[in-house]
Image (spheres, helix red, strand yellow):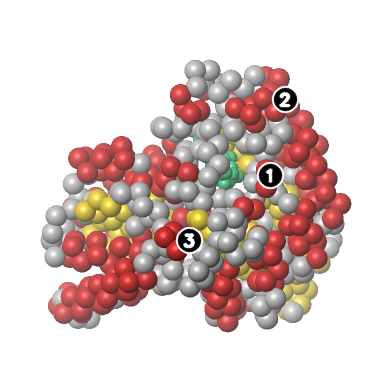
Amino acid sequence: MNGSIQNDKYIDDREIDRQLKIAGQVKSILSADERFSDVSPKYYIQTLGCQQNEADSERIAGLCALMGYEATEDPSKANIIFVNTCAIREHAEIRAISFIGEYKHIKDKDPSVIIGVGGCMVTQGHRADKIKHGMPYVNFVFDTGSIHRIPELTLSALRGQKRRFLTEGKFGIAENVPFVRKAPHLAWLSVMYGCNNFCSYCIVPYVRGRERSRRADDILKEARHLVESGAKDITLLGQNVNSYGKDTGEGVDFADLLRKICRIDGDFKLRFMTSHPKDASDKLIVAMAEEEKIAKHFHLPVQSGSDRILKAMNRHYDVEKYMSIIEKLKKSVPDVSITSDIIVAFPGETEDDFRKTLDLIDEVKFDALFSFIFSPRTGTPAARMSDQIPKEVSRERFARLLDLANPISLERNSRFVGRTLRVLAEETGKNDPSQITCRADSPRPIHISGPKDLIGNFINVKITKAETFSMNGEIINEV
Ligand code: SAM
Ligand code: SF4
């Protein structure tokens, strides 16, 4: 280990080894169980929320595989069920609670089923308490810092020991936890965890701890392994990737890291999210412009077009600064796709503030917007602000925002019609299984017809039609 690095932010390798050994014990118990003499025990993971949760679920899956469980897509066939929860908005919490309730019915039929609940929602003490006292069928709860302890939790549950609640809020980096990816060609790669920004509306710093970057060498090793095992599209993850490396003492910032990953041999695309405008550097924009492997897509959440609201949100930039980044981006990276997040009806937002947000959207012309109605999160400053916006006003503003943003998205997607793009054939169409969903640099899905064995390959596709949220295309040839 590099001596200049703060090693205390890492979970001790010996603890990870201990958990991996316990996984072996679980496997032995399961293989001695006559219920599993003909069929393997099964795991099911319900993942809610963002890409970070998706990446965490890949770790949960990796640990399940090590314990001898096989994946199932059907929760009613599972012997162990995980709900990986989200807390970013109330709606996500309601969904998590409803899933847990649904799995209770499965357990009613077979009391040996183990239910584990993890993720951001249960990292909040009041939510973990609710499960402790109101959902006795949940065997264990693990916060976002305790995923590596799933083998220990599973072993306790299998032995019928008392329910466990790991909600200590210790957020270290756990290296060497195995993972199982949903598809070999698509990969999440966490470069850092947590957040220091404390935007006044956001629960993330409370449920994922302070910012901690992984060592560049560990990330490169993982990236190399991903490429060698068939990854064609790698998305680097962090709540604020632009501040990557501030705590490693290695002198490698995010733009340097991107360039190092681009030097890995192989045909792959590199994406990243999320960038915070206060830290988006010129160096990063230059790296995107120069490096062929970096997808020309920048997700830069603005949240509001009003300086007054940005200040109340504790975002540390103003509209002028945001627009200057957008200008540089458009100038330096031709044909770049720009996407953003917006919060509508933040406490105290006036009609004038909201109009400024609409003006900004109209000026930037985002390829896609992820817009959310403000949702008060217990424990955050914005939830305590007195001037909350009535529901009717939020809904009306939200609808007006979509009325503006959707035609812009359609117009942006239309620029590709008639062009041939190099795309990755990602997966079978979700709405139409006869189709394949592909992706070029723009994050918008492109639907094509074609043989399923193209999935996982780069192909050339001519865009034939643009819709608001997707495009249609036809295969030109495989490349
Ligand atoms: N770290 C990223 C950033 O700062 O842009 C985003 C993290 S968050 C998972 C994704 C988006 O959820 C945010 O950009 C914001 O628009 C939205 N969000 C976060 N807290 C919210 C809240 N309390 N109510 C509504 N939307 C919220
Ligand atoms: Fe939340 Fe702000 Fe951190 Fe993003 S930067 S995770 S919005 S606190």
Give the labeled residue for mark 2: 355
Mark linked to residue 98: none
Amino acid type shown at disc 1: Pro
Q: Secondary structure at mark 2?
A: helix
Amino acid type shown at disc 2: Arg
Give the residue drawn at x 70%, y 49%. 280
Which of the two labelled residues, at mark 2 and mark 1, occupies the earlier sequence position? 1
Disc 2 residue: CB within 8 Å of ligand 1? no
User: Residue 420, position in %: x, y?
Assistant: 81, 67
The foreground one among 261 and 11 is: 11
The foreground one among 213 and 442 is: 213
Give the labeled residue for mark 1: 277
Based on the displayed image, in which of its 4 quarters is residue 134 positioned?
Answer: top left
User: Residue 150, position in %: x, y?
Assistant: 30, 63
Residue 237 seen anywhere in this rendered image of the structure:
no
User: Residue 190, position in %: x, y?
Assistant: 53, 62
